[in-house]
């Protein structure tokens, strides 16, 4: 969800079978269930619907936002429930949404796809602007200790199934910038390469940005051993939502 769309046609072409299939949605759904059941819900970084589709079965209404036309096209090609709407937009900018939401969430590090702490702060403020006071906001961000360890390992190749082949992943950390690269090599299809660059930021800094954006009751569940993400829960404060501080970030 950065200015340059990171999830283009390449990653969209393998996302469902390479990523969604290999990351069980059940634990995430159980974490979200209390907040989304019967609620008007916003997902940031809806992708191909890995989480939005099961959440729609619980919620009154779900709006899925993404800045990748390729990912949204994959999702639109599926059979969508009547209470799921899709919007192409970038969370770094004021969101083109009407009404207020009772809950919002982002998974698989979607909110980390920004270029700086200032952009993350702007994104959080934009989310707060479309939430009702007291609304729940849940999201995850990349675990700093884990990804620094992974960067020391060098390239890692793993087998894939259905389709059979391999996937090679690289991780590089330069200050607060995390860059990952993935090459998927099916045995009977062309290789697909995609990369991602995200902000690597510690929980204490995230807490400060959340407070500035108007969120309260912040709880952080640090990633466990070999878990990729820290999990955050907070609520929209009762005060007025912050005004747009970005000054118009470039698209």
Image (tube, helix red, strand yellow):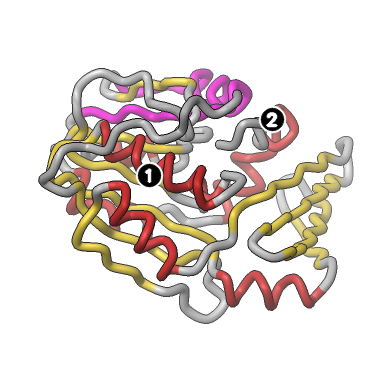
Q: Residue at x 78, y 59 (%)?
A: 169
Outermost bottom residue: 225
Q: Is residue 156 left or right of residue 147?
A: right
Residue holding disc 2: 8
Local crowd at mark 1 within 10 Å, few (<14), some, or many (≥20)?
Answer: many
Residue 175 x %, y %: 69, 65
Q: Nearer the viewer, residue 53 or 140?
A: 140
Q: Quadrant of residue 207?
A: bottom left
Q: Quadrant of residue 43?
A: top left
Task: Give, as a single range, the part of the protein colored magenta.
Answer: 61-81
Q: Is residue 148 left or right of residue 193?
A: left
Residue 157 x %, y %: 82, 64
Local crowd at mark 2 within 10 Å, few (<14), some, or many (≥20)?
Answer: some
* Label 2 SS: loop
Disc sitting over residue 124 in the figure: 1
Name the image quarter holding the C terminus: top right
Q: How many marks?
A: 2
Q: Residue at x 13, y 43 (%)?
A: 239
Name the image quarter holding the N terminus: top right
* Label 1 SS: helix
Q: Nearer the viewer, residue 58 or 244?
A: 244
């Amino acid at each position: 969800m950065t200015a340059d769309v990171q999830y283009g046609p390449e990653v969209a072409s393998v996302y469902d079978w390479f990523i969604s299939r290999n990351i069980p949605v059940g634990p995430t759904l159980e974490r979200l269930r209390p907040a989304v059941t019967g609620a008007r819900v916003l997902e940031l970084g809806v992708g191909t619907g890995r989480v939005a589709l099961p959440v729609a079965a619980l919620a009154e209404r779900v709006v899925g936002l993404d800045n990748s036309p390729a990912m949204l096209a994959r999702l639109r090609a599926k059979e969508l429930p009547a209470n799921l709407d899709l919007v192409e937009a970038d969370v770094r900018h004021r969101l083109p949404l009407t009404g207020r939401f009772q809950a919002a969430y982002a998974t698989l590090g979607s909110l980390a796809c920004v270029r700086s702490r200032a952009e993350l702060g702007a994104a959080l403020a934009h989310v707060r602007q479309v939430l009702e006071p007291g609304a729940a906001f849940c999201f995850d961000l990349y675990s700093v200790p884990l990804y620094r360890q992974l960067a020391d390992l060098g390239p890692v190749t793993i087998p894939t199934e259905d389709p059979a082949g391999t996937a090679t992943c690289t991780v590089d950390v330069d200050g607060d910038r995390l860059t990952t690269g993935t090459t998927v090599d099916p045995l009977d299809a062309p290789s697909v390469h995609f990369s991602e660059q995200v902000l690597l930021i510690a929980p204490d800094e995230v807490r400060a940005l959340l407070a500035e954006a108007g969120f309260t009751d912040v709880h952080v569940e640090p990633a466990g051993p070999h878990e990729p993400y820290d999990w955050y829960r907070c609520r929209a404060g009762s005060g007025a939502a912050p005004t747009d501080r970005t000054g118009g970030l470039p698209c």
